[in-house]
Amino acid sequence: MTSKTDGNFDRTPLIAGNWKMNMDHAQGIALLQKLAWTLKDAKHDFQRVEVAVFPPFTDLRSVQSLVEGDGLQIVYGAQDLSDQDSGAYTGDISGEFLAKLDCTYALVGHSERRTVHHESDELCRDKVRAAIRHNLTPMLCIGEGLDERQSGNHVAFTLEQLRGSLADLNEQELEGLVVAYEPVWAIGTGEVAGPEDAQEMAAAIREELGKLYSEDFAQATRILYGGSVKSSNVANILGGADVDGALVGGASLDAEEFAKIARFEQHLLSN
Ligand SMILES: O=C[C@H](O)COP(=O)(O)O
């Protein structure tokens, strides 16, 4: 499998590791070095499959030094950002600061932010806007909980989050947007959505993007799946025509396992 192609649109697969609140800066550097060595040994082609990590804020300066010092092709981003740029917002981190650390991406609306910190779609929309203001690519996370899944309302619920989190933004502003579909019931639980479930939702998200914006925008937007992704299931999940990558939590803390996930094409061939 190469880039997902539809007409003129190539969507380079993206494998992203969200370290969550794990790895202090020294541990983070060790993990990133090991990941880089493992991928180098495997002759990983970063043009073919992009690899990104999302360390805690306190690791980002060290990650920047390592990536720039060693010329790594692994890119990185922040797990969150403020909707504000500066001022009396104790504990918040501005997109401006993240841009100065050469972050490529910023996660917005991860389900743990939405549930633990009660972040609304409206706040997520403002965070998407803040990311764009600072030339960070937003990776917008959406996905249903177990109740919505069991009641069969999962598609409607997730698309409502999508619309709410992108309200009033136009497609020029959103160029490069990445959407991560993460069913909350599959995060850190070992429960993984089946490849058909991931594909069903990714297709619905793409269709909705085509209604909200242009068909070209919908076809160019990468849609990832997240929720208990491992090297043993990634190839099947990414087999869906609309699934362009994975947002990996727990398994991204093990360099060899995460490298295997990034090498999902080889894994598919060897099975
Ligand atoms: O951001 C990553 C997701 O929350 C998935 O986490 P997980 O792979 O540990 O289930």
Image (cartoon, rainbow, N blue to C red):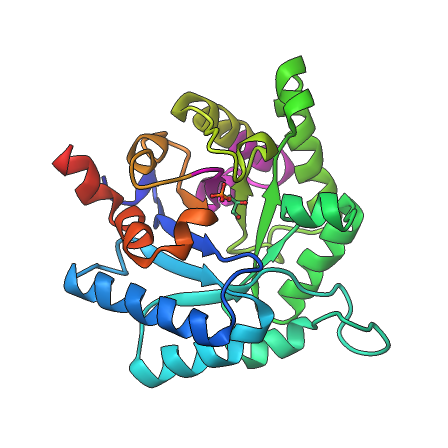
| 14 vs 267: above or below | below
- Magenta residues? 205-228
Left or right relative to 120: residue 136: left
Instruction: Name the residue at 64% across, 31% down.
Output: 158
> Where residue 200 sits: x, y (%)?
48, 23
> Where residue 266 sits: x, y (%)?
17, 44
Which of the pair 232/24 is nearer the observer?
24
Q: Looking at the figure, which quarter contains the N terminus?
A: top left
Queried whether the magenta region covers residue 223, the answer comes back as: yes
Q: Looking at the figure, which quarter contains the C terminus?
A: top left
> Where residue 160 sits: x, y (%)?
71, 32
Queried whether the magenta region covers residue 203, the answer comes back as: no
| 189 vs 253: above or below | above
Image quadrant where residue 36 sits: bottom left
Task: Report how many numbered discs are placed on residues in the image.
Answer: 0
> Where residue 153 sits: x, y (%)?
67, 18
| 29 vs 50: above or below | below
Instruction: Name the residue at 35% across, 48% down.
Output: 13
Left or right relative to 114: residue 248: left
Instruction: Name the residue at 60% across, 45% down.
Output: 141
Which of the pair 199/190 is nearer the observer?
190
Which residue sits furthest top?
A: 151
